[in-house]
Image (cartoon, helix red, strand yellow):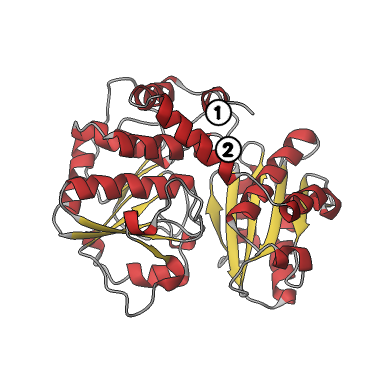
Amino acid sequence: MLSINQRMANVSFKANVMPKNQAQHIDNILHSGKSVDIFCHSISDEDTFNSATAFYNYLKQEGINARIIASGGKSNYDYDTSKYNIIQAKDINDNTKKADIALCVDFSSKDRLNSNVYKHLQKYDTSKIVGIDHHDDKNKLHPDFNQVTKIYEKNQVPALEAKNYYIDSSAKSNCGIIYRFFEALGKTPNKEITRALYTGFFDDTAKSKCELDENSKEVKAKLSSALNILDFGKIQKHFIEKTMLTKEEKAFAKNLKNRVQYSKNGKMAFIEIKNDDEEWNNLGRNTEKTTIILGKFRKKLLDKNKNLESVAVFYPCEDGITYKMSITSNKDYAMKIVDYAKEYYSKDIIAGGHPERCGGSIVTSNPIEQHKWVNYFINSSNQIKY
């Protein structure tokens, strides 16, 4: 197994320098209240969860009460509900009291929130909602945002009007942007914050295939220099434990190749898991482990088969009414497939993410409706230009 540093050398993300006035604007809003709700996106992964814990620890330092709203991901780094004051997204309801300020991390679209969590977020006046993200999703949940897509020249930070939401869609890790947030404020993150940022940084960048650009290497070097061998050992141990599979999970992973189907043009491979799939249901459906299994499967099949441009998996969730999809692709084909499906099949499709990695969902337990939804993406793969 490659070490974290060895794996980091094979991936890439881009982290622009955040303008000081932008960072200060967000920080001022966070300090304008006594309490903050930190929102993670649905099926909270390492990048969103560690973005949240980094801010949680920062706010705690500043004497501000904070709460993290997350879903799934209980094996995420240092996932401790008492330590971090975490409330599971499924437990959010009409009676859940809001904090003074809402902070959204690693998402900027309502499509990436559970419906009950989005309903809770709507309790906040937009002036009390701030966010940091790196996705170029539609259906922005906040009207006031800066979106940066180009790499800044070194030491030449553009003069942006400060806004509540900062989106750097050229970055592959939200934790990297948050590091730039602290840097812009002139504040050095403590060890726990740094460890969280490095963990989220590593996990999200490990999902890409590019070389690190100079800007990103600088972020990595600064985070790494603040950690010692014991810190890296804890992070390594976390990822090893997170990927350990049971006998049943190993059998499921091994048999995935027998479930594969292909689009008519042969550019997309896909697996469609049905509601009554006994093996999937016995595993608990979309658990942290099955999410990892499906992610590795998509990447491995795409790397192995040079004729493929995308691999998708469609599967029912544990609530019995949500049906999800995840696409991994070369270049920007995942987003092209999603965009085509939205334009030509249904404008109400809930899906988005990165150019090469997208996810989506539909709320229905009807197998006919689910299959129809699946075909939107398969047919879109047949129609887009490769």
Where residue 219 appears, as percent x and y from the top left, is 37, 26
Which quadrant of the rendered structure holds the C terminus? Answer: top right
**Along the line of sight, the residue nearer the viewer: 246 or 108:** 246
Is residue 290 visible to the viewer in this orientation of the structure?
A: yes
- Image quadrant of residue 227? top left
Which x, y percent locates residue 35?
Answer: 20, 60
Q: At 65% from the left edge and 65% from the top edge, which residue is drawn? A: 284
Q: In which quarter of the image is the N terminus?
A: top right
The location of residue 69, given as percent across then percent down, is 38, 61
267 to the left or right of 70: right
* Residue named by callout 1: 11
Q: How many marks?
A: 2
What's the mark number on residue 156?
none
Compare marks 2 and 1 and give the one earlier in the sequence.
1
Residue located beneath label 2 in the image: 207
Inter-mark Cα distance, 2 to 1: 7 Å
Closer to us: 8 or 79? 79
